[in-house]
């Protein structure tokens, strides 16, 4: 299945049904009077977040969604049927924008969340509605109101607990493939990862969702390389795992390059708790490893993990740290209750 995180869709709610002009006709009743019924309301257009979807690929093959027209009124005061509504089923984490791609309509962050995007037109009144003491035989009825129509943009931001960031070939996809059952493409050239990947990691009977996005390079916020398009997929994460490859000559500058891109992107992404790790350390001797760890620690201003997904070095420790931070954030946000002896404020704030 191809990954698609943005789609343009045209929607139109149904028109209301027309009211009826009718007069009661029955044997032995000379003046039956008007009995034209009202038209039915047009169908609405809804959007709903459902389980089991993680891409907007369905909207590549269908971009037009229209509610049904309401039924017309009929004689004997019969009201027309309501038009059938249509529902766009989207993955959890989908945002709906107006055509300008900036005005947010709704943000569906929970399974089952629904929002009415367009309301069907009201049905027209039949002539029975207009009967009065001074007009006992009206010969007109209202047409139904037209439905709403608009063009909207769907934008998916994946729901994940932790996100992987770093330059291309920093080992992000290898890390994801090692700790989860995800099978991203892995190769020794830049931008092997062309779209985000998700996986479920587990440690000490705790599970969390890990998101891997394409690598960032200098100028990504200005569209260089793949650009910052995919950074939206780690906006909702609780923690960022910043991987710096041991193959880099200047690990401190490499770290600062990615940090600058996160700051330039905005959306409070740079304020998230960050765990820094020197990856692919199995290629270094002890002296070089210590030298690069020291430089990276100085640049980041915090502890640095030394890991190798291929050689399984330091993986348990970093997974435990990720799980610990995620748990602390859930407690801080009130999503989970603190356990006995748990330090609620341990990861409340991270200082670069």
Image: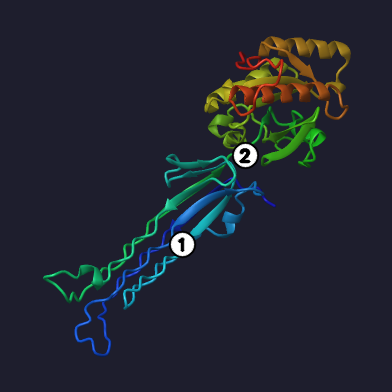
Residue 338 versus residue 106: which sits nearer the camera? Answer: 338
Q: For the residue labelled by badge 1, is the local secondary structure a helix, a strand or a loop?
A: strand
- From this viewpoint, is residue 264 visible? yes
Where does residue 72 sit, x and y in percent of width and height?
A: 36, 72
Q: Around disc 1, counting alpha carbons within 10 Å, would you say few (fewer than 14), some (14 to 19), or many (20 or more)?
A: many
* Residue 62 versus residue 277 in the image, above or below: below
* Residue 145 versus residue 229 in the image, above or below: below
Where does residue 319 sit, x and y in percent of width and height?
A: 77, 25
In this figure, which residue is indicated by the disc labeled 2? 158
What's the residue at 16%, 69% (across, down)? 132
- Corner quadrant of residue 120: bottom left
Q: Residue furthest front?
A: 28
Where does residue 14 sit, x and y in percent of width and height?
A: 41, 63
Which part of the image, by quadrant, shows the C terminus?
top right
Please give the count of numbered marks on the rendered protein: 2
In this figure, which residue is indicated by the disc labeled 1? 66
């Amino acid at each position: 299945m191809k990954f698609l995180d943005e789609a343009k869709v045209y929607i139109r709610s149904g028109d209301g049904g027309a009211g009826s002009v009718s007069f009661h006709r029955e044997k032995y009743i000379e003046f039956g009077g008007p009995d034209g019924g009202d038209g039915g309301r047009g169908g609405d257009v809804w959007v709903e977040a459902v389980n089991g979807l993680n891409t907007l690929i369905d909207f590549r093959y269908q971009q037009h969604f229209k509610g049904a027209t309401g039924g017309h009124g009929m004689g004997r005061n019969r009201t027309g049927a309501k038009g059938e509504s249509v529902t766009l089923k989207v993955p959890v984490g989908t945002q709906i924008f107006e055509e300008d791609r900036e005005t947010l309509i709704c943000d569906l962050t929970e399974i089952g969340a629904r929002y009415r995007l367009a309301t069907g037109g009201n049905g027209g009144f039949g002539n029975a509605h207009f009967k009065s003491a001074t007009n006992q035989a009206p010969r007109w009825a209202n047409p139904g109101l037209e439905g709403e129509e608009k063009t909207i943009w769907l934008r998916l931001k994946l729901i994940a607990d932790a996100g992987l960031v770093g330059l291309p070939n920093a080992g992000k996809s290898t890390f994801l493939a090692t700790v989860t059952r995800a099978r991203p493409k892995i190769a020794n050239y830049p931008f092997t990862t062309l779209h985000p990947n998700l996986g479920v990691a587990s440690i000490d009977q705790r599970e969390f969702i890990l998101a891997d996005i394409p690598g960032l390079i200098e100028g990504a916020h200005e569209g260089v390389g793949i650009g910052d398009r995919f950074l939206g997929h780690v906006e909702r994460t609780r923690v960022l795992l910043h991987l710096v490859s041991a193959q880099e000559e200047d690990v401190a500058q490499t770290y600062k390059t990615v940090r600058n891109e996160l700051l330039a992107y905005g959306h409070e992404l740079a304020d998230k708790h960050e765990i820094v790790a020197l990856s692919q350390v199995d290629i270094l001797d002890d002296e070089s490893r210590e030298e690069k760890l020291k430089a990276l620690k100085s640049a980041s201003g915090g502890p640095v993990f030394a890991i190798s997904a291929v050689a399984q070095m330091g993986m348990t420790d970093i997974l435990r740290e990720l799980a610990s931070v995620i748990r602390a954030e859930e407690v801080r946000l009130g999503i989970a209750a603190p356990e006995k002896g748990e330090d609620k404020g341990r990861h409340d704030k991270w200082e670069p």
